[in-house]
């Protein structure tokens, strides 16, 4: 069984994944895979450099993410082009990672993805687990973690899928607004259920 884990920014997706990992459940992080496919030597990076030129490369040949982000946010058609180059490769690599973990005998596997629904990666999973916190907590955590002011934090949250829509699409929900002990108890209960059904 594959469980997709998602949630808004600063909801605690990685914290939850580590709690499952402590119980012996491996995970694939879609953000890590997205970085893998644009590393030096990868075909996607060569295509990106060919399209946008040296301005999107650092001196060491790695991707200049900020420069690329500025281009694709200013021009939606360029963002669509970038997604057409990277998304199929990301999906292919996620599938390979998940299959490897399943072959190693994991009880079930997590796919941690902030854009699980938006990217269509929810089609790759058997259950969708949403990590939920009130928006006020998201604003505070985002501002503290990313060193942005509250207005910027609100803009980041507003750009994401609405909380109500994420929750409506969830098979399971973890409320991560309480204590570490509360979170651990919710993870343990879901782990028990997932092991019974996988």
Image (cartoon, helix red, strand yellow):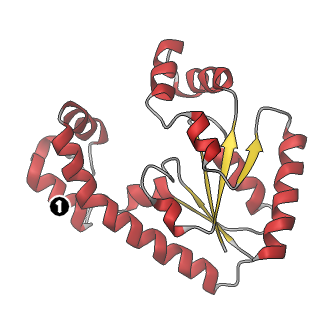
Nearer to me, 105 or 54: 105
Q: Is residue 63 left or right of residue 50?
A: right
Q: Position of residue 174 (x, y in %)?
A: 76, 46
Q: Measured along the vertical axis of the image, is residue 159 above or below residue 51?
A: above
Q: Is residue 36 above or below residue 179?
A: below
- Residue in view at x 20 percent, y 30 percent: 74
Tell me where residue 79 appears, x and y as whole percent.
23, 44
User: 44 or 86: nearer the eye?
Assistant: 86
Q: Classify mark 1: helix, strand or loop.
A: helix
The quarter of the image holding the N terminus is bottom right
- State which quadrant residue 41 falls in: bottom left
Image-quadrant location for residue 67: top left
The answer to whether residue 28 is left or right of residue 82 is: right
Q: Which residue is mark 1?
A: 46
Q: Residue sitting at 87 percent across and 58 percent down?
A: 188
In the rendered image of this protein, does residue 162 appear above or below residue 111? Answer: above
Residue under the point 53% across and 34% down:
162
């Amino acid at each position: 069984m594959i469980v997709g884990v998602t949630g808004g920014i600063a909801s605690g997706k990685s914290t939850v994944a580590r709690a499952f990992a402590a119980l012996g459940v491996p995970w694939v992080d879609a953000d890590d895979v997205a970085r893998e496919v644009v590393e030096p030597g990868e075909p996607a990076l060569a295509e990106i450099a060919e399209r946008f030129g040296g301005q999107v490369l650092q001196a060491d040949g790695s991707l200049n993410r900020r420069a690329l982000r500025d281009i694709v946010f200013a021009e939606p058609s360029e963002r669509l082009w970038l997604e057409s180059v990277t998304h199929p490769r990301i999906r292919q690599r996620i599938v390979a990672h998940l299959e490897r973990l399943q072959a190693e005998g994991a009880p079930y596997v997590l796919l941690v993805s902030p854009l699980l629904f938006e990217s269509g990666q929810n089609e790759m999973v058997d259950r969708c687990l949403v990590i939920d916190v009130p928006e006020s907590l998201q604003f505070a955590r985002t501002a503290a973690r990313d060193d942005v002011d509250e207005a910027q934090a609100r803009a980041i949250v507003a750009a994401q899928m609405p909380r109500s829509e994420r929750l409506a699409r969830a098979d399971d929900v973890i409320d991560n607004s309480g204590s570490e002990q509360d979170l651990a108890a919710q993870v343990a209960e879901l782990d028990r259920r997932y092991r019974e059904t996988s």
